[in-house]
Image (spheres, helix red, strand yellow):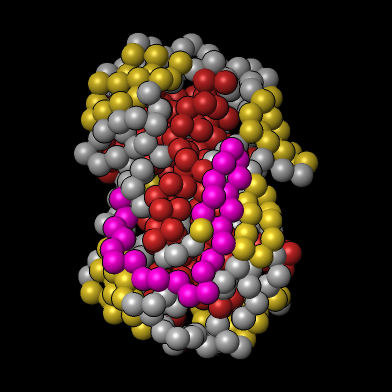
């Protein structure tokens, strides 16, 4: 089993380009199966464990996928399968988005219940309810979902919570459904906009993505497209936190600053100097970070839950006491126990964490418990005194392309063993 060995204490300085967004490329790859006319070409696809699992799912369904660098070509012109087995679905929580795409193409699907990081309950009832309103019948039996739709129907529907996955599944199912589907209380995340842009590039008619109301005019067929995936906003925030906590100076290229506004605002509160223009963000850290009185996670454009663990690690070395409230997932403070092994002072009660800044962290043997928790341990290790070994780094591999090389390029001392 691989692990990361990090010698802390070096400031993270320099410039790198941010890779393509994991949370955008996965639904885009699922959407590619809706095209039975030509070959899709998708650029800026990061080499991640989650992307590779998604490619395995595509190939299991009968899709031809080839990779050259960060470009994928996807040929779904042959007959498409309807079944995704447990051994693939269990590796990836977001694999549930294939449900809407397969049903739109084949009018039936058999998929195992999804897996992924253990972040507490993430029920798929919102997905099921939305697809049921579009005319699907869904039955669960022995861990599988059996979905059928003789004829999908358009309608106006409202999500009880702005779920990203349920919004994506609805868009995928509705874009080939006759009539006009209106989705109210839709998720507003930039990745939703990226999916809509890709679908529109294939000939779909979707407007309102990025707002709470998305309107989908059904079309009869989609064609192939050449598309570039948006930059990964959470990877960008991760590298910014690495620089902030080590007293560094970093410039990120291939970013969309507007996607990072809430995180950049909080970094400024910590005393960082932040400059953003065009597709570039620069951060200059202070000698010592300042605490943040309160951070509360919320759906976009609020503070992203995926950045919560990253800030938790960073704030362990900030002067004063910080507070973080997690409103999206119930089990997202697991990393606190691992950070405490490094000398952090964190008190967790229900959905709140109080972080009392300490003068220094010390290297320790710790284990990643999920993707962003693993990245949080990397952030802490870069600032700690001594050597930190991080196990279970397969979680980190799910979301970061070329992490070790990038950090070493920025002056860190990181080895993968």
Residue 370 location, x and y as percent? Answer: 47, 66
Image quadrant in which the C terminus is located: bottom right
Q: Is residue 381 above or below residue 125?
A: below
Displayed quadrant of residue 357: bottom left
Observer-nearest residue: 87 or 329?
329
Image quadrant in which the N terminus is located: bottom right
Q: Residue at x 32, y 55 (%)?
A: 297
Q: Residue at x 47, y 43 (%)?
A: 259
Residue 76 location, x and y as percent? Answer: 63, 28
Q: Is residue 185 magenta?
A: no
Q: Is residue 218 above or below residue 264?
A: above
Q: Is residue 93 above or below residue 393?
A: above
Residue 280 location, x and y as percent? Answer: 61, 45
Residue 275 location, x and y as percent? Answer: 54, 50
Q: Is residue 285 magenta?
A: yes
How many marks overall? 0
Asked if residue 3 shows in the view, the reply is no
Q: Residue at x 78, y 41 (%)?
A: 68
In the image: residue 283, left or right of residue 369: right
Observer-nearest residue: 85 or 368?
368
- Please give the range of residues in magenta: 274-298
Asked if residue 7 shows in the view, the reply is yes
In the image: residue 369, left or right of residue 65: left
Displayed quadrant of residue 103: top left
């Amino acid at each position: 089993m691989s692990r990361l060995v990090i010698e802390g204490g070096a400031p993270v300085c320099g410039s790198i380009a941010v890779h393509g967004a994991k949370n955008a490329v996965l639904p885009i790859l699922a959407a590619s199966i809706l095209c039975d006319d030509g070959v899709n070409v998708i650029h800026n696809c990061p080499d991640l464990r989650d992307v590779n699992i998604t490619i395995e799912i595509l190939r299991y369904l009968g899709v031809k996928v080839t990779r050259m660098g960060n470009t994928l070509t996807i040929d779904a012109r042959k007959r498409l399968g309807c079944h995704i087995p447990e051994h693939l679905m269990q590796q990836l929580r977001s694999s549930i988005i294939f449900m809407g795409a397969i049903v739109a193409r084949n009018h039936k699907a058999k998929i195992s219940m999804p897996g992924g990081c253990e972040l507490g309950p993430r029920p798929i009832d919102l997905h099921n309810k939305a697809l049921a309103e579009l005319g699907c019948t869904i039955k669960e039996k022995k861990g599988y979902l059996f979905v059928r739709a003789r004829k999908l129907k358009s309608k106006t529907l409202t999500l009880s919570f702005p779920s990203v996955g349920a919004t994506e599944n609805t868009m995928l199912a509705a874009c080939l459904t006759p009539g006009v589907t209106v989705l109210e209380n839709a998720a507003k995340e930039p990745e939703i906009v990226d999916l809509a842009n890709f679908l529109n590039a294939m000939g779909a008619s979707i407007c309102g993505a990025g707002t709470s109301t998305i309107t989908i005019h059904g079309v009869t067929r989609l064609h192939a497209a050449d598309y570039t995936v948006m930059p990964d906003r959470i990877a960008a925030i991760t590298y910014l936190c690495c620089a902030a906590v080590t007293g560094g100076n970093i410039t990120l290229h291939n970013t969309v600053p507007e996607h990072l506004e809430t995180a950049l605002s909080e970094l400024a509160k910590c005393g960082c100097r932040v400059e953003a223009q065009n597709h570039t963000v620069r951060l200059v850290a202070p000698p010592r970070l300042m605490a943040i009185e309160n951070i509360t996670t919320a759906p976009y454009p609020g503070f992203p839950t995926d950045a919560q663990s990253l800030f938790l690690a960073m704030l362990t070395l900030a002067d004063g006491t910080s507070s973080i409230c997690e409103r999206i997932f119930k089990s997202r403070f697991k990393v606190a126990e691992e950070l405490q092994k490094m000398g952090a002072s964190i008190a967790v009660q229900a959905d709140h964490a109080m972080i009392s800044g300490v003068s220094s962290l010390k290297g320790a043997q710790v284990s990643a418990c999920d993707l962003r928790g693993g990245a949080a341990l990397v952030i802490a290790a870069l600032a700690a005194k001594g050597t930190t070994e991080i196990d279970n780094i397969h979680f980190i591999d799910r979301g970061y392309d070329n992490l070790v090389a990038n950090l070493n390029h920025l002056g860190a001392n990181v080895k993968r063993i």
